[in-house]
Image (tube, coloured by chain):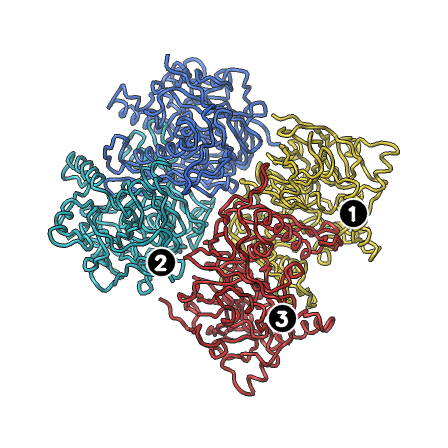
Chain colours: A yellow, B red, C cyan, D blue
Amino acid sequence: MPETLIKVDLSQPAPSNEKVHNRWHPDIPMACWVNPGDDFVLETYDWTGGFIQNNDSADDVRDVDLTTVHYLSGPVGVKGAEPGDLLVVDLLDIGAKDESQWGFNGFFSQKNGGGFLTDHFPSAQKSIWDFQGMFTTSRHIPGVRYAGLIHPGLIGTLPDPKMLETWNAREQALIDTNPDGNLANPPFMATAHMGQLKGEARDKAAASGARTVPPREHGGNCDIKDLSRGSKIFFPVYVDGAGLSVGDLHFSQGDGEITFCGAIEMAGWVHMKVSIIKGGMAKYGIKNPIFKPSPIVPTYNDYVIFEGISVDESGKQYYLDVNVAYKQACLNAIEYLKKFGYSGAQAYSILGTAPVQGHISGVVDVPNACATLWLPTQIFDFDINPSAAGPVKYLDGSIDMPISYDK
Amino acid sequence: MPETLIKVDLSQPAPSNEKVHNRWHPDIPMACWVNPGDDFVLETYDWTGGFIQNNDSADDVRDVDLTTVHYLSGPVGVKGAEPGDLLVVDLLDIGAKDESQWGFNGFFSQKNGGGFLTDHFPSAQKSIWDFQGMFTTSRHIPGVRYAGLIHPGLIGTLPDPKMLETWNAREQALIDTNPDGNLANPPFMATAHMGQLKGEARDKAAASGARTVPPREHGGNCDIKDLSRGSKIFFPVYVDGAGLSVGDLHFSQGDGEITFCGAIEMAGWVHMKVSIIKGGMAKYGIKNPIFKPSPIVPTYNDYVIFEGISVDESGKQYYLDVNVAYKQACLNAIEYLKKFGYSGAQAYSILGTAPVQGHISGVVDVPNACATLWLPTQIFDFDINPSAAGPVKYLDGSIDMPISYDK
Amino acid sequence: MPETLIKVDLSQPAPSNEKVHNRWHPDIPMACWVNPGDDFVLETYDWTGGFIQNNDSADDVRDVDLTTVHYLSGPVGVKGAEPGDLLVVDLLDIGAKDESQWGFNGFFSQKNGGGFLTDHFPSAQKSIWDFQGMFTTSRHIPGVRYAGLIHPGLIGTLPDPKMLETWNAREQALIDTNPDGNLANPPFMATAHMGQLKGEARDKAAASGARTVPPREHGGNCDIKDLSRGSKIFFPVYVDGAGLSVGDLHFSQGDGEITFCGAIEMAGWVHMKVSIIKGGMAKYGIKNPIFKPSPIVPTYNDYVIFEGISVDESGKQYYLDVNVAYKQACLNAIEYLKKFGYSGAQAYSILGTAPVQGHISGVVDVPNACATLWLPTQIFDFDINPSAAGPVKYLDGSIDMPISYDK
Amino acid sequence: MPETLIKVDLSQPAPSNEKVHNRWHPDIPMACWVNPGDDFVLETYDWTGGFIQNNDSADDVRDVDLTTVHYLSGPVGVKGAEPGDLLVVDLLDIGAKDESQWGFNGFFSQKNGGGFLTDHFPSAQKSIWDFQGMFTTSRHIPGVRYAGLIHPGLIGTLPDPKMLETWNAREQALIDTNPDGNLANPPFMATAHMGQLKGEARDKAAASGARTVPPREHGGNCDIKDLSRGSKIFFPVYVDGAGLSVGDLHFSQGDGEITFCGAIEMAGWVHMKVSIIKGGMAKYGIKNPIFKPSPIVPTYNDYVIFEGISVDESGKQYYLDVNVAYKQACLNAIEYLKKFGYSGAQAYSILGTAPVQGHISGVVDVPNACATLWLPTQIFDFDINPSAAGPVKYLDGSIDMPISYDK
């Protein structure tokens, strides 16, 4: 087996682990170094560092402090990597920790970040997913079973000071347009965990360390379900050694990660291999990461596909707005699934966790964008195809997802 | 062979054909009637009714009058279909007309509708695509060859008066927010072609007939590449007989139809079969059409995937805006393809016409949406994968797409 | 549209068409000539030249004279092709003739060639399949609908005299081991149709012209379902001009073409393009054709898979015999399908015509070969998966395939 | 994590493990019992019990005693399973043991079992394959890298006495036709390992215990590459408790397992779940196991496909013999790969280990069977497609597989 360069102990608080961090900053010391061509394993906490528990209450989803996330393992320094290079990462395999064969999906309270459909699902809810080898099922959502499309929600390289400054400046400019709008998350020192950085150096870096929530030029929290085990990613390099960090592992997720909390979130490990393309950023004109998909992914290929256009639930017309269109496609799918006996929350959780595809189908036909949501039929224990006979209620409503109202 | 219920003569002007129309209105008479279970063929003009020619000038793309589009074949009345039903349409096969084995792709001038990347490609340009059986190539864009993912860009049912009023009202409300912004297209009587409707009745309907550009609740101009031959679509029914119309056939298209003019546009025919699910809208909670994909589609499954986030080219930060993110993914792909010798225009045209996937990858990680553009590698005559050796220029720049500047 | 170089009139007897032949011989004159890079269309008879009719009697299947088959369109001469080259054929598209949108599948009487399971199905039977665009259904076999995997059962190049002599010699040697065993078909002059060859020249060639039944080094009657439209084939060239002939079109077929008569047999047309790799046979070490599969094929990917081993129905043990093993897998699948209400004949016809896969799964584990038959579940109107509840009879037995007993 | 019911210690001899056996006999005691619905893990030796080493000599392949194989973990008793039921086995996941992340492929000497192409490769040879997560490469065969299609070569249920007697009788009858021909392997007491059975009981059972080499009605050594992790298998039950045993794990294999020793052989573990369909054998007409493929398998879909017909290398004509045809397809593929610089042995090993498909393409066209071998192009580091330019030698021949000649 390859060497495990970073270990995490799920019984210990994530901030106690010096090879873990929760902000992006060039001053965070490399947790370890590797050579190009090396393959190695990094263990990771779940993105909340273990705050969400395997139980039947959504209180933890309601109460989680989002300034503490995401706990990332790294940074890993790659010898010889220099600014302008591409860091090539082969995700050779990814799994849950042996002692933690489960994951969670949740909806945040509208007061605590919400989610894509928070107007319809304003309260904290949670579903727990058990893993059985390559598959998952949930005791809170009967009738579905997926093969995992296992991937890191978050993986990226360290920014250099200039890139960091750019991020902070542009995000602050957005915040300034509506300071109470939660439009973005500025640096926040109190809960920053800067890896091995201590004392004044830690405080200084923590004061400007970029939050881990958004994806950015370096990768980061892309939540791309197709960065799955077996894929190959090409990252921009901004600092000597590149500084690769990873976390926020997902057992499965639908396009959009619409429930925000989010996919099927888990603690686990990533087996990866690194190499370098010297000067690759200029050679290939790279600004954001590019990647090659995995040759081993779930092969579900039968779908019911839902259309949505950029007119919202109230009938208001938007101009070519894909977000509105995709929201409508999601709501249409939820209404459809309710006809088979699911609660709206269960349907929403399925869309957030199953290998659902979300396509930008038409984006030029003024004024309506058109988005499609592809729901795989083969993940259901029963037939969800439309027919002349009409839908058969498979579920009796006796099982639902836990909910915790705001205090 | 099934009966051809609507024929089009490409040598005659589209408005002379009474079984064709270019507006949506409940008063448009059915062009013909069929029974549930029937299969039949409808021929169609290309969306511009033949305005764009197979030549090496983009003048026609620059000069086209967009108030005249789209020329649709229909409406077909389906006996027994009533409001609240679902009209089930099997697209049994679709093809180009024998005498017209070619199609076009273009960018409109920024003054005439533009396209998704009009700021970067502000002038009219055109590429011509020849069909060789199930494949297409372009004399203006060497090095690519696709299997066709043939589909109608536009297919839908007639609105009832209330639905029509809703459309016109909500779109006018948007227009009113910026009357000079070309945010939407209001009814326009002069160039309206209302099928068999004549005289006063025609004028009255033409005055309020909805334009065909946007997709709406009835389907319409969805430009969903996956509504391809072999797929099965479930349409809401608003009027007795449903009133199914189709046109704007595409030989191939990428997600988003980003070049607006648009896919590989062609004249052709659609062989389809219709049936009805009584009361299906309520049974399945249907607001917009749903569909099942075709079992025969191009199987390209190797991709280079480009990420984009909602920060625009100038560095401005947007809030969870998928449009901006997808635009960045497209621009990133274009820069990449230029390294292999393509012009920007050629690369843009490839993204608009090839079976490119556009995914809504992350839509909850404030402030950045993340979109991905999936470029199939198997459509290229050469290797476009990134490698340590760097890109090899396959093209010498001697061939490019015709351009016509605004007069 | 490309030029149609060979036309067939289905209302005229196949032997009256001089651009058609039913034997392989180097003296058959080229029916036409093309240049490398040309694309063109050849029309073809069904393999029996129209003997089998679209009706509900199997008399024609019982009575067909197998010395008359297969009627092939060609040979097409390709300028510049020389012995030792590879002839590259792109099957750009294939279809049924407009006026003949149907096909047939049959079992020959055991006295007239039989089929793979002739011991179980000794009498002539027939099923008729109607085409609806890209799909087919049969009035004799309810409950199934396939997307077509359209391909030529037979396509190949002309042998040179030495190759022809080799074929005749080795096949005669086999016949000589059991002259009454129908082990192979020797040349047979009476019904030989040698294209444009007339008089003495015809008689001489007819006396030694190889029968078209078996596949050989030049391709020929390979009955490979995956040589489907969109595929690219590389044929050995033995004579100047190569001499490409094609016929025996199939709308769909399962691996093995186990019913012998055979696939869904049809008259139609092939749109193809030719080019040449000079000296390609030596360059690539080619003895038999190689090919690249089509990028557009049915994507059915859910199967029930049946195993068979080389122990026959009587319990007799064979040594690593894949034929016996595949026969058992087929019989196992037939027994399974009977539980859902199909007759044995219907089940057999499904296995012969649907895009069933037959894999050589294990061929070294003495004494048992293991073969698998992959039955796609998505072609059925009902659920054929095994379940704890047991099979539900979907069919009541009121419909079956016509049968005609030997006279 | 699920419980590991059977553990194997790779540092100890396999025969010392009482939860392992190498013969099939109803008297072998259940190694453990489980309930329907349980999921659990069984560890397994490689099929030779550790005889083949990770080194650069083929001596061990030459010298292995084939009377000792295969070492199977089990039998597992399933409570409530009775003769006539179907035992449903979900292969939830399969992997190599952590401490043994490698596998081997070999050719047996012609004197010791040989392989499918033993006439061409008569001496013992070996290649070692290293695993890197979901992928494998070999230091003995450069230029290829596969994603694993991990599966048990051998899995099956215990026979009852009558079934066992049938096996032994029919195989002995075959042996008797040519006692020196190695046509099958009769019971052999000396090296029989009968699990917990000891003393006289062991000797009695060992005297008639069926060898594990062939696949039979109960499953057994099917070497079906598609029984991969994620698949669901339905086994006949012959004895109370069913008695499920598994071993001979493969990281990857081509159809046919043509090299006999065989796939990429490894020690590992199987995570599985069991359930029962009462009376399922009669309900579904089951004689041999049936199965559903995994939804997670390598998605390689671009191939070069080689044809073979039933005429052997010497030109001898066989009658519809699929074995001969597949052998020719294999030899054709080997000749092709040699043009790119591989040795014949390397090419043979690739065909035996990569996810190569072997199809029974035509089996009724007297006298030639037609088989096809599908070689995935995406496993190669270079382009193996045929082109007008001819093949480029990628390999210089400096690396080859170890060989050990018979002593």
Q: Nearer the viewer, residue B164 or D55?
A: D55
Q: Residue furthest right?
A: A200
> Badge 2: few (under 14), some or many (20 or more) residues near its Cα, within 10 Å?
many
Label 1 or label 2, whichever lies nearer to me, is 1
Q: Name which residue type carries label 2.
A: Gly
- Above or below, comparing residue B154 to residue C384 in the picture: below
Q: Residue at x 34, y 43 (%)?
A: C86
Q: Nearer the viewer, residue D193 or C288?
A: C288
Q: Which residue is mark 1?
A: A166
The chain to which mark 2 is attached is C
Q: Secondary structure at mark 2?
A: strand
The chain to which mark 1 is attached is A
Q: Name which residue type carries label 1.
A: Thr
The percent position of residue A219, horizontal first and vertical second, equals 69, 43
- Above or below, comparing residue B37 to residue A121 in the picture: below
Q: Quadrant of residue D337?
A: top left
Q: How many numbered discs?
A: 3
The percent position of residue D386, horizontal first and vertical second, equals 41, 41
How far apart marks 2 and 3 lie (CA) works out to: 47 Å
**Whether label 1 touches label 3, CB < 8 Å:** no
Q: Which residue is mark 3?
A: B407
Q: Which residue is mark 2?
A: C95
